[in-house]
């Protein structure tokens, strides 16, 4: 599985490219912001002369941050990772292949852990009829966020409550798919990332009676192995309808929703 989650990576590339166009680095040499300089090094042309000044500067800033950080500062690990990358490359930019390999590695570790523990490692808050929210429209910021009934609460909780045998079989199937490099395989893995504040169920409907249901906790992810083919993906994300037609011939990652709670 050389390029797992390739489609997601392509979408990510489009998003990053769009962001680049809106950045102004005209005063970057005056910057004292680690994140801003780090972003410049990722975006700038390889031959940009400002790199020779800003790369050592930001590395020194990262070292200083780590040295003075308080215990438990979650940003320290990220700074350490960036420093390690900057010691061997021009920037902290990650290629599509590296991104896909990292995601695949994390998924394998996650499901191997579940298999060893013989139980799901997913931590989630069970659904209830009152935990779906609709954010106010941008044009009416004064309107408060309103709660609406979650008609899928019972179904979500039921799908998450797999018995040990079902869970073990599913985990083995997912791991086999993650390790499978055969392009002629009849099945492949689909991973859904839920960035919203609400638990969701993603319905994957194919031709005839081929249907799958995948529960995905808020701010979490879940995976499923499906037969290759054409599918309609639908879901209700915090009260909003989602629908998309997808042809699945290779591993796929779909990211849904965005956090709306403050």
Image (cartoon, grey):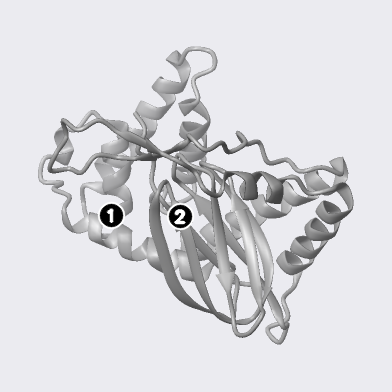
- The residue identified by callout 2 is 236
First in residue order: circle 2 vs circle 1: 1
User: Can residue 1 be seen from the camera position used here?
Assistant: no
Q: Is residue 156 above or below residue 79?
A: below
Across and down, in percent, residue 102 comes to 59, 54
Q: Are marks 2 and 1 in contact (CB under 8 Å)?
A: no
Task: Decide which of 108, 246 is in the foreground and name it.
Answer: 246
Count the marks: how many? 2
Quadrant of residue 72 in the image? top right
State the residue at coordinates (60%, 33%). 125
Q: Is residue 7 above or below residue 151?
A: below
| The C terminus sits in image quarter | top left
Tag shown at residue 136: none
For mark 1, give the secondary structure: helix
Left or right? Give the position of 133 relative to 168: left
Label 2 to label 1, Cα distance in Å? 36 Å
For mark 2, give the secondary structure: strand
Across and down, in percent, residue 176 comes to 79, 66
State the residue at coordinates (63%, 50%). 155
State the residue at coordinates (74%, 62%). 174
Circle 1 packing at 10 Å, graded few (<14), some (14-19), many (20+), is: some
Task: Decide which of 164, 42 is in the foreground and name it.
Answer: 164
Task: Decide which of 158, 206 is in the foreground and name it.
Answer: 158
Circle 2 packing at 10 Å, graded few (<14), some (14-19), many (20+), is: many
Left or right? Give the position of 137 relative to 41: left
Left or right? Give the position of 85 relative to 28: right
| The N terminus sits in image quarter | bottom right
Across and down, in percent, residue 137 comes to 20, 43
Task: Decide which of 226, 232 is in the foreground and name it.
Answer: 232
State the residue at coordinates (72%, 83%). 186
Tag shown at residue 43: 1
Quadrant of residue 114 in the image? top right
């Amino acid at each position: 599985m050389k390029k797992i989650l390739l489609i997601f990576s392509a979408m990510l590339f489009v998003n990053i490219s769009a962001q680049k166009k809106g950045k102004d680095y005209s005063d970057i040499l005056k910057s004292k912001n680690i994140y801003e300089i780090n972003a410049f090094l990722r975006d700038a042309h390889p031959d940009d002369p400002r790199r020779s000044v800003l790369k050592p500067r930001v590395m020194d800033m990262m070292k200083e941050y780590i040295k003075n950080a308080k215990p438990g500062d979650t940003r320290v690990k990220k700074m350490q990772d960036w420093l390690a990358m900057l010691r061997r490359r021009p920037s902290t930019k990650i290629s599509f292949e590296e991104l896909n390999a990292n995601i695949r590695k994390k998924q394998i570790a996650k499901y191997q852990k579940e298999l060893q523990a013989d139980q799901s490692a997913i931590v989630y808050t069970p659904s209830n009829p009152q935990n779906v929210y609709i954010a106010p429209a941008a044009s009416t910021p004064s309107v408060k966020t309103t709660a609406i009934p979650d008609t899928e609460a019972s179904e979500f909780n039921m799908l998450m409550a797999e018995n040990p045998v079902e869970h073990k079989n599913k985990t083995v199937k997912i791991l086999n798919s993650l390790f499978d490099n055969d392009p002629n395989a009849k099945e492949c893995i689909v991973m859904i990332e839920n960035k919203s504040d609400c638990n969701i169920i993603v319905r994957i409907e194919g031709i005839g009676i081929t249907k799958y249901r995948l529960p995905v906790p808020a701010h979490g992810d879940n995976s499923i192995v499906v037969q290759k083919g054409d599918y309609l993906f639908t879901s209700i994300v915090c009260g909003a309808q989602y629908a998309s037609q997808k042809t699945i011939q290779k591993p796929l990652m779909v990211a849904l929703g965005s956090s709306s709670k403050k």
